[in-house]
Amino acid sequence: MLEVPSPSVTHAPPPAEAVAPLMRGLDVLRRLTDADGTLALAELARATGLARSTVDRICATLAHLGYLRLDGRDASLAPPLMAIPNACLDALRVPRLLGPLADGLADRLDESVSIAVPDGDDIRFVHQVLRRRALSISFRVGDLLPGEGSAPGIVFRRGVGLAVDDQLVERGLIAVAMPVRGPSGEVVCAVSVVSHTSRHSADSLPGAVREGLSGCVRGMEEVLRDDAAVSGLRPGPRSSSAGGAGFVHALARGLSVLTVFSGERPALTLSQVAEATGLSRATARRALITYEYLGYVRQDGRLHRLTPRVLGLGCAPLSRTTLPRIAEPHLAALSDALGESVGLSVSDGEWVRCTARVAPRRVMSVDIGVGSRLPAGATAAGHVLAAGSGESAEIATDGPEDGLWSVAVPVRGRDGHVVSALDVTAHRGRGERAAWAEALRATAARIEAELRVTSRFVTVPRH
Ligand code: PHB
């Protein structure tokens, strides 16, 4: 049966078995998420009330796990952290099962459509299809809205069959939500159609969308009836190795518990968690007790499930990203290593448009600004993009101006299609093209890995 677990909100002191370093690490991740992804380390210390040295150790540990990026005084959430919200989205199963039907409704109505589940007294988005970007504000997957006022919140709180949000959540925004029920009649999620006062009023929107929305809800309820829960057990990743002095093992071990949940294994016993993580039963038990205390896990008999609160660990800021933003730190590292200008571009008709570029600081460097366009035929990036998803290797070519070398490799999306081209461009006669190609491919692979984890449940714009 499909069930969306609700976290139990608690203000009691933590149980004696709770793992303090895990609680601190989760607090850091949550505060970074609420700050939209980046905070100064000093600010994190102030916000959490932890000693600066403790914050430094927690952040170094999270950085070692790939979940954070440390950049001078700032800590930023990094795309690999999406593995944790992804485990939750997968285990909830609603996005994967019902997302395609929401996409279809958005196409038919040409309006934004979202799916939300309850999270304590509030609601959390687990799927979003955005339409008419310019006029609709864009909540993203993982965003939390107040239960009071938002259309899905009213559906859950009052048990009504249709609710309207008339600019309560945001000025200009009108939303209509309906409940979607599971096979035993329980409300599993709410589907909303979201419009704007420039197109509809709170009076006109329900009439305009009711038929389409009810049809979509019926389709979703059918999918839920046909869905038989699978709970087969397959071995998960073993817990990771040491990360040097100061590494907070208790935090790393605790976090590994979250990623063993999935669509195939949405509910696990303590023994299953211990087996899948490679942790001892005692360690797994203490991690589960910690998560349950904080509302990230709910226990139901012998089974443990993730709650939508897990999406509060990085999901919204990381899913608001774009390909150039994912790529930028990797471009900077490559530009540093080669001492050359490194860029990312997309196809734009007969042109290629630069979407990101990092150039070394020196007198004679290639000057191609972000947003600038070059004729596709004259650049290596253009050749790579024109070759599409075929066997496109790097191509060296003259141009984009006389005296320049440009070598480019494709960057592929989750589905294997070429979404962008990564290039090194330099004045002829400098650098070694063979070494460039290899370094470009390694960088492209890193960008692709982060793009894959980020775009599992959300759409990542190419520019
Ligand atoms: C949204 O999906 O952005 C949305 C849905 C319902 C609301 C407000 C916003 O009440």
Image (cartoon, helix red, strand yellow):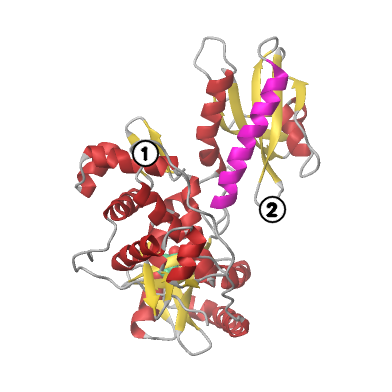
Side of 25 where 80 appears, left or right: right
Q: Secondary structure of the magenta portion, mostly?
A: helix
Where residue 313 appears, x then y in whole percent? 39, 55
Residues 391 and 215: in front is 391
Residues 427 and 339: in front is 339
Magenta region, residue range: 432-454
Identify the element where label 1 is drawn.
helix
**Identity of the residue drawn at 54% across and 68% down:** 95
Residues 312 and 322: in front is 312
- What type is the residue that disc 2 sits on? Asp
Q: Quadrant of residue 449?
A: top right
Query: Dot 2: few (<14), some (14–19), or many (≥20) neighbours within 10 Å?
Result: few
Q: Mark 2 or mark 1, which is nearer to you? A: 1
- What type is the residue that disc 1 sits on? Ala
Side of 374 where 257 appears, left or right: left
Where residue 130 appears, x then y in whole percent? 53, 60
In reply to whether residue 176 is colored magenta, the answer given is no
The residue that mark 1 highlights is 60
**Identity of the residue drawn at 43% across and 70% down:** 270
Residues 365 and 416: in front is 416
Query: Dot 1: few (<14), some (14–19), or many (≥20) neighbours within 10 Å?
Result: many
Side of 279 where 324 appears, left or right: right
Q: Please determine whether, in this image, residue 300 is positioned above or below residue 76.
A: below
**Which comes sooner in the sequence, label 2 or label 1?**
1
The residue that mark 2 highlights is 415
**Identity of the residue drawn at 46% across and 76% down:** 190
